[in-house]
Image: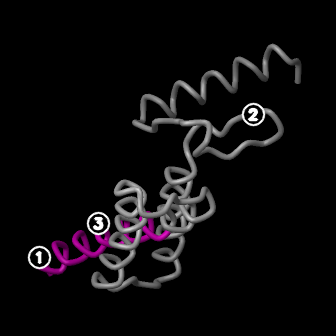
Amino acid sequence: MKKQTKIKTWAFFMRLGNRLGCHQREDRSFFIGKWQFPICARCTGILLGQIIAVILYCFKIKVPTILALIFLLIMFLDWYIQYKKIKESTNIRRLITGTLAGIGQISIVLNVIIYIVSLFN
């Protein structure tokens, strides 16, 4: 692939990541070589977790709502500890807590949908 095509492709995904609401801070993003991911480490984890949750659902593995809420709380605590300047989070920790939150988020949505559908059966 030509360098100009790579730059245009990268720029497209960076704009997309920005439009989806990611702050895209360099210090909170992963890199492949010199190319920054279009979304930060936490957003990467959230997206990864959402994909994992859908795969789990396809294999009929249900994440209990209480566990999903705990997953969301873990990410919130990581953010809050950093926000209060108690301890700076790392990109790996952001990825892990984001992944848990993504699993929690989609699991709650699926559990609500399943519950609503069950009301009509």
Q: Residue furthest top?
A: 4
Residue placed at 70% from the left, 24% from the top? 9
Which residue type carries mark 1?
Phe
Q: Name the front one of labels 2 and 3.
A: 2
Residue 19 image offset from top left, x and y in percent: 43, 29
- Judging from the image, what secondary structure is the residue with disc 3 in? helix
Residue at mark 1:
120
**Is 43 left, or right, of 115 in this rendering?**
right
Residue placed at 69% from the left, 26% from the top? 10
Residue placed at 88% from the left, 18% from the top? 2
- Judging from the image, what secondary structure is the residue with disc 1 in? loop
- Indicate which disc residue 35 carries: 2
**Magenta segment, which residues?**
100-121
What distance separates the C-alpha of mark 1 from that of mark 3?
Answer: 18 Å
Occupied quadrant, residue 36 = top right
Residue 97 drawn above or below residue 20: below
> Dots 1 and 3: beta carbons under 8 Å?
no
- Indicate which disc residue 54 carries: none
Say which label, 2 or 3, has the lower sequence index: 2
**Pick the front one: 118 or 52:** 52
Occupied quadrant, residue 103 = bottom left
What distance separates the C-alpha of mark 1 from that of mark 2?
Answer: 49 Å
Residue at mark 3:
109
Which residue type carries mark 3?
Val
**Is 51 left, or right, of 75 in this rendering?**
right
